[in-house]
Image (cartoon, grey):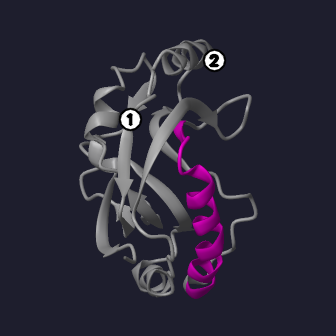
Amino acid sequence: MSKPNWFVGIPIAGVELAARISEPPSGIRRFHPEDLHLTVAFLGMCGEERARAGWDALVWTLPALDVTFGAIVPMGNPRRYSALSAVLDEGRADVEAAMSASRDAVCDAAGVPREMRPAKAHVTVARPARSTTDGERRVALRWAAAIDLRGVRVRLSEAALYTWNDDRASRLFRAVATRPFPP
């Protein structure tokens, strides 16, 4: 097994969100409800010591807030997307501003390159396998478009330092540290 990735994210209490996401078509893996998160800063395979240094540098000034979701959209290469993600609707601008304001310090402290793309508040809900065919990807896009997340409201109230789960067959990620948002 390769060296695990690390990232700082915002856990999503995903029970209602996950309940709205039907079983995906062939070639697509739906995320476990406890794996749902918003990534604030991706640290990659930097190792635990550097990841914890990045975690210690996190300054999150946004208090707890309720957000809602919009559509599930493909992310990554437009010709061969790598994820299907629910974008935030209500609360999106505030969360993206907080992400932008905090992620450079996290990356700098961890000694990893800064993210050059603008912050995009989204929750990955499913991923295609590497072997997923173009036809399966088209079916998956129709599946994603049919999922209605309007009215799903979740409270964002803490940040977490994540790495890979020990048993990635059941869940992909595990939080090794959490911190509540400021009051």
Q: Name the one closer to the observer, 93 or 80.
A: 93
Label 2 packing within 10 angstroms: few (<14), some (14-19), many (20+):
few
Kind of residue indicated by mark 1? Val
Mark 2, secondary structure of its residue: helix
- Residue 60 point in image, percent of width and height: 50, 76
- Relative to 88, 181 lies left or right: left
Residue at 50 percent of width and 70 percent of height = 62
Residue 150: quarter of image: top left
Residue at 65 percent of width and 68 percent of height = 100
Quadrant location, the C terminus: bottom left
Label 1 packing within 10 angstroms: few (<14), some (14-19), many (20+):
some
Q: Which is nearer the N-term, disc 1 or disc 2? A: 2
- Residue 44 point in image, percent of width and height: 54, 66
Which residue, given by chain and number where applicable, does mark 2 sit on? 134
Q: What range of the chain is rendered magenta?
A: 85-109
- In the rendered image, residue 89 lying in the magenta stretch gets the answer yes
- Total number of numbered labels? 2
Which residue, given by chain and number where applicable, does mark 1 sit on? 152
